[in-house]
Amino acid sequence: MCGRTSCHLPRDVLTRACAYQDRRGQQRLPEWRDPDKYCPSYNKSPQSNSPVLLSRLHFEKVPLGKGRRCVVLADGFYEWQRCQGTNQRQPYFIYFPQIKTEKSGSTGAADSPENWEKVWDNWRLLTMAGIFDCWEPPEGGDVLYSYTIITVDSCKGLSDIHHRMPAILDGEEAVSKWLDFGEVSTQEALKLIHPTENITFHAVSSVVNNSRNNTPECLAPVDLVVKKELKASGSSQRMLQWLATKSPKKEDSKTPQKEESDVPQWSSQFLQKSPLPTKRGT
């Protein structure tokens, strides 16, 4: 499970969606490593590169090693429910509940790229607990980063769809503690690994079944009875607004710069998802 995700925000919007407060209470943006490797997609498979948050300490004071903690980012993930009495499976898109904010304004259709961008600035990314590894080829060459998402028993709201779900870090404090391996011990960090009910979902088209399909239709809510697009409300309605625009393409803009600080920061690193089975929750 958790093998298929969506992460189609443009690079600069994704950066703003990861804004956080440092230990001094200042609003900061994470730095990118190898930003050109990022390729927005509505339908990411396990073989693709994904944006992942790492502690900056991994690159400054502490050597990269096995079993390091990271946070895997996505708009949400797809899961398939087996239909009783048939061999068919119904896909669902699962994500954090989205709330209306002052910045996003009206929930009407995004009628211009500018409005679309403002709405997406308020999209809450799904933050999944993971661990990563770093492998250096003996003959030399590029270092290979890989990650795996930690899973736990499914929450009550998702149990009818699948019996497992990713370990979701709900809130900036949980994300910070998971990344802060220098101050937060493994035993303390494992207390963050548990199911969460703060999740929502909607049925989507079988178009997402083929990982080669990379269109907004992958995320669009569908009616399970008549198999047509819903007149959605709440989070699903906001999803439809964003999908009214063209798929964002890879951007050439430079990585946002941040001021120097001796405070540990988050850093986004692209890692390839490990083909190994996901670590089971505790």
Image: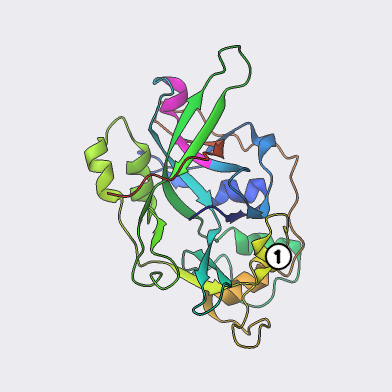
- Horizontal side of 157 relative to 145 (left or right) equals left
Was residue 56 drawn as part of the magenta stretch in this picture?
Answer: yes
Residue flagged by tag 1: what amino acid is it? Pro
Q: State which quadrant residue 273 falls in.
A: top right
Q: Is residue 210 above or below residue 141?
A: below
- The residue lying toward the viewer, choosing from 67 and 97, is 67
- Horizontal side of 72 relative to 34 (left or right) equals left
Name the colouring of the figure. Answer: rainbow
Can residue 115 be seen here?
Answer: no
Q: Residues within 10 Å of mark 1 (few under 14, many from 20)?
A: many
Q: State which quadrant residue 22 falls in.
A: top left
Q: Label 1 belongs to which residue?
A: 216
Was residue 94 drawn as part of the magenta stretch in this picture?
Answer: no
Residue 249 in the image, given as x and y percentages of width and height: 75, 50
Residue 199 in the image, given as x and y percentages of width and height: 42, 67
Instruction: Identify the residue at horizontal 35%, vertical 48% (top origin).
Output: 280
Residue range of the region highlighted in magenta in the rendering: 52-60
Q: Secondary structure at mark 1?
A: helix
